[in-house]
């Protein structure tokens, strides 16, 4: 079996360790490189030791060298770091799975441009269950297009730096598209003071940050006399890691293109 050779960015972080664990456990995957910031105290350590399974792959800060011997980089870091990695992937023809969120419109354009040369799966959430929820939301929003107010409620750990989450925003986009609305024109991100009566077409977002919550998302359709809630709750980061490996399998053999998990799961 020809195994897919992976590099993991941010390998010493919580998500990075989960990705290492998932790659080491997958029969068709091989951990070839592990990347960290040059100031990380984990530089030079065996990446497998982070999950109790030494594997002979040392954590490095040398991006160019690390990507010289891999098929795919999985990146769940920060936008600036991801774009730095993107440039090297593009130069070396390495596939890229991007689970990072918080990109600006201009940064997303850079990702799209790079997809002319390499294959990229870019999604706000890699979990298969969450992407099933995106599909359910599309169906629900088309049915509940009149007479229902929409609210998106999300909760994450205290360390998350962007709000609302990329997953919550994508949920809002799915609902808005299905209802024939444009999210930037109908979204409201939190309410305070005398806000007046709620506009019928508004899509509201509420954000909770605290503790070690991995990720909870609920879309509420509130009508007269009834409420419909579609909820996804993550108990660990492993579904994101397993989805990322599935995304890499999907890209295997592809030369270029920009994809998301809806493509990976054939949900279009």
Image (tube, grey):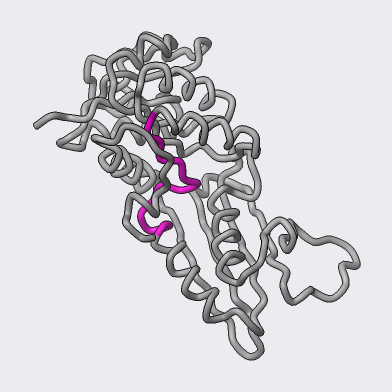
Provide the residue span drawn in magenta.
118-131
For the residue pair 215 and 79, the one nearer the viewer reads as 79
Q: Quadrant of the C terminus?
A: bottom left
Left or right? Give the position of 199 relative to 24: right
Asked whether 58 falls inside the magenta stretch, the response is no
For the residue pair 258 and 86, the one nearer the viewer reads as 258
Residue depicted at 71% across the width and 60% down the height: 187
Q: Total of numbered circles in the picture? A: 0
Left or right? Give the position of 178 relative to 29: right
Residue depicted at 47% across the width and 73% down the height: 139
Residue 197 in view here: yes
Q: Position of residue 239 (x, y in %)?
A: 35, 48
Residue depicted at 37% across the width and 34% down the height: 256
Q: Looking at this view, name the residue that lies furthest to the right.
A: 194
Q: Looking at this view, name the residue that lies furthest to the left.
A: 1
Left or right? Give the position of 108 relative to 91: right
Residue 22 in view here: no
Asked whether 126 falls inside the magenta stretch, the response is yes
Residue depicted at 33% across the width and 42% down the height: 247
Q: Is residue 225 above or below residue 200?
A: below
Left or right? Give the position of 171 relative to 52: right
Q: Position of residue 229 (x, y in %)?
A: 53, 74
For the residue pair 138 and 229, the one nearer the viewer reads as 138
Q: Quadrant of residue 6?
A: top left
Q: Is residue 14 above or below residue 42?
A: below
Q: Position of residue 11 (x, y in %)?
A: 40, 25
Q: Quadrant of the N terminus?
A: top left
Q: Is residue 40 above or below residue 148?
A: above
Q: Position of residue 84 (x, y in %)?
A: 52, 20
Q: Is residue 69 above or below residue 136?
A: above
Q: Looking at this view, name the residue that lies furthest to the front.
A: 116
């Amino acid at each position: 079996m020809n195994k897919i050779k992976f590099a993991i960015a941010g390998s010493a972080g919580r998500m990075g360790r989960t990705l290492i664990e998932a790659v080491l456990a997958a029969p068709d995957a091989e951990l070839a490189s592990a990347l960290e910031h040059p100031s990380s105290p984990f530089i030079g350590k065996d990446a497998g030791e982070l999950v109790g399974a030494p594997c002979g792959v040392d954590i490095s800060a040398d991006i160019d060298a690390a990507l010289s011997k891999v098929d795919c980089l999985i990146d769940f870091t920060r936008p600036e770091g991801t774009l730095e990695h993107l440039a090297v992937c593009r130069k070396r023809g390495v596939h890229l799975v991007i689970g990072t969120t918080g990109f600006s419109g201009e940064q997303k354009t850079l990702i799209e441009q790079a997809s002319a040369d390499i294959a990229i799966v870019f999604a706000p959430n890699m979990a298969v269950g969450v992407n099933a929820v995106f599909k359910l939301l599309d169906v629900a929003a088309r049915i509940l297009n009149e007479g229902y107010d929409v609210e998106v409620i999300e909760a994450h750990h205290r360390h998350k730096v962007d709000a609302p989450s990329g997953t919550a925003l994508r949920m809002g986009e799915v609902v808005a598209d299905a209802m024939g609305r444009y999210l930037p024109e109908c979204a409201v991100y939190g309410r305070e003071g005398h806000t007046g009566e709620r506009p019928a077409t508004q899509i509201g977002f509420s954000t909770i940050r605290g503790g070690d919550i991995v990720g909870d998302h609920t879309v509420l359709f509130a009508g007269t006399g009834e409420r419909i809630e579609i909820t996804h709750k993550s108990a660990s980061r492993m579904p994101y890691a397993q989805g990322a490996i599935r995304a890499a399998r999907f890209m295997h053999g592809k030369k270029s293109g920009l994809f998301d998990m809806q493509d990976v799961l054939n949900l279009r």
